[in-house]
Amino acid sequence: MDEQQPQSTAKLWGGRFDRPTDQAVEAYTSSIDADRRMVRQDITGSIAHARMLGRQGIIPADDAGAIVSGLSRVLAEAESGAYQLDPRLEDVHMNVEARLGDVIGGEASGKLHTARSRNDQVALDVRLFTLEAVQSTVRLIRALQEVLIDLAERHADDILPGYTHMQRAQPVVLGHHLLAYVEMLERDAGRFADCGQRTAVSPLGSGALAGVPYPLDRIYAAQQLGLAAISENSLDAVSDRDFIVEYNAAAAICMMHLSRMAEEIVLWSTTEFGFITLDDAFATGSSIMPQKKNPDVAELARGKTGRIYGNLMSILTILKALPLSYNRDLQEDKPGFFDTVDTLTSTLDIFARMLPATTFHTNRMRAVARANYALATDVADYLARKGVPFREAHHVVGALVGYAVREGRELHELTLPDYQRFSPLFEADVLTIDLVDSVAARDVPGGTAPVQVQAAVQRARSRLEAHRAAG
């Protein structure tokens, strides 16, 4: 028989086996690199479990107290960096239990695993991590919303061209444009909050798959962890990773919104648009072209969005063919998930830093908004208000624009006789239609009129304050 492994590195399941695991298998199956992110969650869950075991008399109260005290010390060591995970131990759970044994002795520490499996333990750990990720993500979304709301208020009267099909369409105000992203982010925050509600469920007590033969107080343990409910089915509880799918899906949508914003930052910072100038702290240069100032932050956000999509597809693919209940495939749920959390939260944070430092060239925006016949719809509305059916007015103004194009003139460069060639209903006041009139006319809730934008800013700010007050 091969020499027995030392107790500190022995497998929890090693009694069944006569030979140690092949080193290649050790490396292949190890989850330490991912698990190290969940040391705090693992210890927090174990403290709640130990308290419950002692309270229920499943283990002696003195042992439970020693375990809780020892785990608290291990947590302090982990947070200070004094304790590092041992790669010879295959996961975070074995590491924590081994260190606990060093602190309080193996006899007492060995009782921690009573009425618990690594299956319900890891399910709890990743739920606790997800809840924290949800909370930090929502905080960062709110911070970015606040930046956008402040900018929207500052630019509630500044006009720029609105686009459809990437063609100049109608004038809007910059504040209205920025508030569009506030609304996208509001939906994102709601999706993460929904995810959090379904994540806040304790699987402790599910054991390996069938529950445990001990008089647990599952609700007490859940309350110790701030979880709102306990799982209803042990088979589902140890194999459920829907909450990771939900976070990844919400993150994919949120990154899509940030990528749309990034695309506009890239476009608007070009010489061709000239709408913004990025602060030097949020741009890079070229190794060969000294004149370059590249919007690398926005470009990277656009590119990282693809990674987030990939992580969503990864977890869906991992789960799609798993029979009940737990399967080792689920070890692969965390690397992509952690990457998604890190990528999304860092992107939200850097956008909230970059936008306030950005210079918006409002004079350039206004000049571009005035060109390319952007007021054509307003001219059609002018005829409609005089009783011309809008479809007919649309046709008339289309012919007028075609004439102006052939003449090489903008609408504001046409004379009243030019207008009256296409309809006798045009009067001198048609020449006074301008950008300010155009945006002011869209005076409906949700419209781009400056008065409506200011009202929308106040609603958005009040909503943000209410969210923060609610915690």
Image (cartoon, helix red, strand yellow):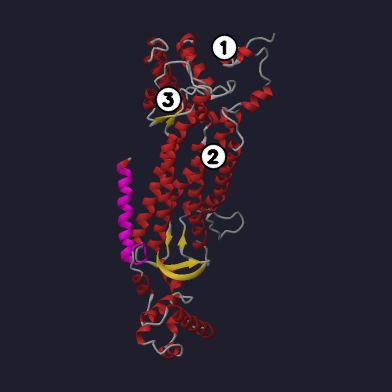
Q: Which residue is mark 2?
A: 339
Q: Residues within 10 Å of mark 1 (few under 14, many from 20)?
A: few
Q: Earlier in the sequence, mark 2 or mark 3?
A: 3
Q: Main secondary structure of the magenta part?
A: helix
Q: What kind of residue is marked 2? A: Asp
The structure residue drawn at horizontal position 34% and vertical position 71%, both measured from the top left corner, is 440
The structure residue drawn at horizontal position 43% and vertical position 78%, both measured from the top left corner, is 390
Give the quadrant of the C terminus.
Answer: top left
Q: Which residue is mark 3?
A: 44
Q: Write down the quadrant of residue 195 in the picture.
A: top left
The magenta region covers: 445-469
Is residue 264 visible to us here?
A: yes
Q: Secondary structure at mark 1?
A: helix
- Please tell me whether residue 308 is drawn above or below residue 201 in the rendered image: below
Mark 2 vs mark 1, CA separation in Å = 34 Å
The answer to whether residue 87 is left or right of residue 179 is right
Mark 2 vs mark 3, CA separation in Å = 23 Å
Q: Earlier in the sequence, mark 3 or mark 1?
A: 1
Give the quadrant of the N terminus.
Answer: top right
Residue 272 position within the rendered picture, expressed as x and y whole percent measured from the top left: 53, 67
Residue 454 position within the rendered picture, expressed as x and y whole percent measured from the top left: 31, 61
The structure residue drawn at horizontal position 60% and vertical position 33%, both measured from the top left corner, is 322
